[in-house]
Amino acid sequence: MPKPIDLWLAIGGVVVAIILYLVPKTPYVVVGLLAVCFLLVIHPVWNFWWIADYNGRRIIAFMLVAGILAVIGRAAWPTPVTFGPDLHGVLIPANDPTPPFPEGCTTPPPNAVILILGPAFGYTTEGMPVLRTETDTLLSLSRGPGGVYVSARVYSEANRVIAQIHDNEFHINPSQVFHRETPDWSTLVIKDNNGVEVLRVSFINRFTIKVLGTFFTPEMGAVRVTDDEILFTLSQNRFGSMCVGESSGMFTLRPHGLTVP
């Protein structure tokens, strides 16, 4: 007859396995939850009436539990961004704190998704942020199982599309050379053939996404977004810290800054 404590430990192991299936996955999350699951289930398995009286059965049961958890871990292991012809995998949220909003900004509600475009802060409670100009979409974000997918176009100064990302699938104009870097599981960096960073997307935490880079647009020329400013090179307009406020999801780059509908 199983002891009540063994029954609760077994139920706890099942719950941890379900949590592993549901939460965003990093290597630390997978290893940690599998270790907890092993510790919870091994005691009831070790003391199961058919196994407890025979050391050989205990060893086999121990190896069987370890093997099953290893298979689950392999299936749950997050897919990193690769360096082949295409870019695969999702960006996984880090667990870093959201940077403080500039003084005077409205505090976003708890369920808002925050977009940080250099020094500009905005948020939306309706889906994921989309960055665009008045005529074109530059970057959009969508949630998928376990993380965020990035779609973006990278333009040259001649206003030609030289690289395109669609749901983290990376396609390059063969005449151009771009380099992808993934400093961690939550960051995507794209550099041109001169080593200049043209796009950086950081998934700071579940509700905060930061975007830096250089965006070429026909109406405004190059728009350079750094931590400190948004620079419109054609007009030489510069903008520092700004509060965009709440958006329906659309954030629009205009010559006078970042705006919402």
Image (cartoon, rainbow, N blue to C red):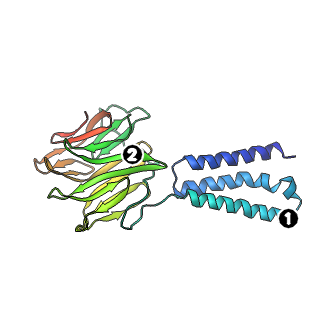
Q: Which mark is residue 196?
A: none
Give coordinates of residue 227: x percent, y percent.
28, 50
Q: Secondary structure at mark 2?
A: strand
**Relative horizontal placement of residue 227, taking residue 125 as reference (left or right):** left
Give coordinates of residue 71: x percent, y percent.
63, 61
Q: In the figure, 83 relative to 43: above or below?
A: below
**Relative horizontal placement of residue 95, taking residue 8 as reference (left or right):** left
| Few, some or many residues within 10 Å of mark 1 (<14, 14–19, 20+) | few
Kind of residue indicated by mark 2? Ser
Say which label, 2 or 1, has the lower sequence index. 1
Point 34% across, 63% down: residue: 180
Q: In the figure, 245 relative to 23: above or below?
A: above
Give coordinates of residue 133: x percent, y percent.
21, 43
- Quadrant holding the C terminus: top left
Q: Secondary structure at mark 1?
A: helix
Depth check: give the residue in front, 112 or 250.
Answer: 250
Q: Is residue 93 visible?
A: no
Task: Name the front one of labels 2 and 1.
Answer: 2
Quadrant assignment, res 113: top left
Q: In the figure, 194 relative to 223: above or below?
A: below
Q: Which residue is label 2 attached to? A: 142
Give coordinates of residue 62: x percent, y percent.
75, 62
Kind of residue indicated by mark 1? Asn
Q: Which residue is label 1 attached to? A: 55
